[in-house]
Structures are given as C-alpha cells and as structure tokens.
C-alpha cells in the first residue's frame, strides 16, 4: 500500500524513521565504544532519516532501471510492484542527495550494473580508498 499511496508512505516514514534512528544511534555508539574501524549503514532514506550528517561518506549505489527491475523480479516481485518501488525512490536521487548534503559529506557513486564479482571488486576497491587516510594516519 505504501508504495502506491504517497500519503501512506509519508505516514509510514513518520512512524518508522524515529525508531530506526534511535536503533542506529545506539549501534553507532556501541561501535565507537568498541573502537570499530568503520561502520556501514544501509539506508534508502539516509538523508530523510537524519543520518547522513553522521557519515564521513555516503555511497550512492546505482544501476540501470532494467537491472533494478530484473533484480527485484528475481526476488519475487511482480513487474508492477517493482515499478512502484522504483518510482517511490524518485528521479534525480544523486542530485537531491548532493544538494541535501551541501558538500558536508563526500558522496561516492558506485554503479552495480556489472557482474556480482565486478561489484564486489568495486566495493572492496572503494572501501580501501576510503580507509587509506585512516591507515596512513596510524
């Protein structure tokens, strides 16, 4: 229902986001106490949920709509349901994200249109690049 009704989606987000934020903040605090070297947050509404400013970097994971549809179909979604989910994300996500962050947080765009192996290599290389300044500081 939420993906077909913008008002229902907004209401769901008003209910869920504060709870998710509290859980994430608690886990971030625990990671800091444990001196975890890095934490990855997976959040489709990172900015809207108020968590982007807690990040050193935001990685925008992108793929072509046809690939996105195929991946959702492989998870059992109908074509209509996949299209509704994709549409709910909206157009121009990268521009909106960069504008919302206003240069305060680095945004990296990663295309996952390749094979699983290519995507894994891309993520590992990007993570190594992101962690390099931390390693050099030690």
Image (tube, grey):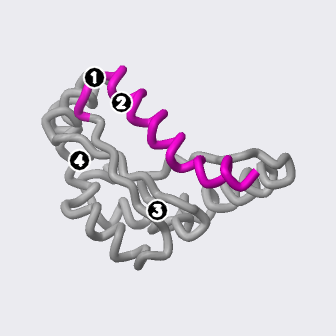
Q: Residues within 10 Å of mark 2 (few under 14, many from 20)?
A: some
Q: CA distance from mark 2 to mark 1?
A: 6 Å
Q: Secondary structure at mark 1?
A: loop
Instruction: Between label 3 and label 2, give the one nearer the viewer.
Output: 2
Residue drawn at the location 46% of the way across and 67% of the way down: 47
> Which stretch appears magenta?
113-138
Is residue 101 magenta-colored?
no
Give residue 83's mark: none
Position above or below: 31 against 128: below
**Along the horizontal axis of the image, is 24 left or right of 11?**
right
Q: Position of residue 90 (x, y in %)?
A: 23, 60
Residue drawn at the location 19% of the way across and 61% of the way down: 91
Residue position for label 1: 115
Residue position for label 2: 119
Residue position for label 3: 13
Q: Position of residue 89 (x, y in %)?
A: 28, 55
């Amino acid at each position: 229902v939420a993906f077909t009704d913008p008002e229902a989606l907004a209401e769901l987000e008003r209910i869920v986001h504060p709870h998710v934020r509290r859980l994430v903040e608690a886990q971030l605090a625990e990671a800091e106490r444990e001196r975890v070297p890095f934490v990855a947050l997976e959040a489709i509404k990172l900015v809207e949920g108020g968590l982007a400013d807690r990040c050193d970097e935001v990685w925008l994971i992108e793929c072509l709509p046809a690939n996105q549809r195929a991946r959702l179909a492989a998870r059992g979604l109908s074509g209509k349901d996949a299209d509704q989910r994709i549409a709910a994300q909206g157009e121009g996500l990268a521009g909106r994200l960069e504008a919302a962050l206003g240069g305060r947080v680095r945004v990296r765009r990663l295309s996952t249109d390749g094979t699983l192996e290519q995507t894994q290599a891309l993520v590992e290389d990007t993570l190594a690049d992101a962690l390099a300044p931390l390693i050099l500081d030690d």
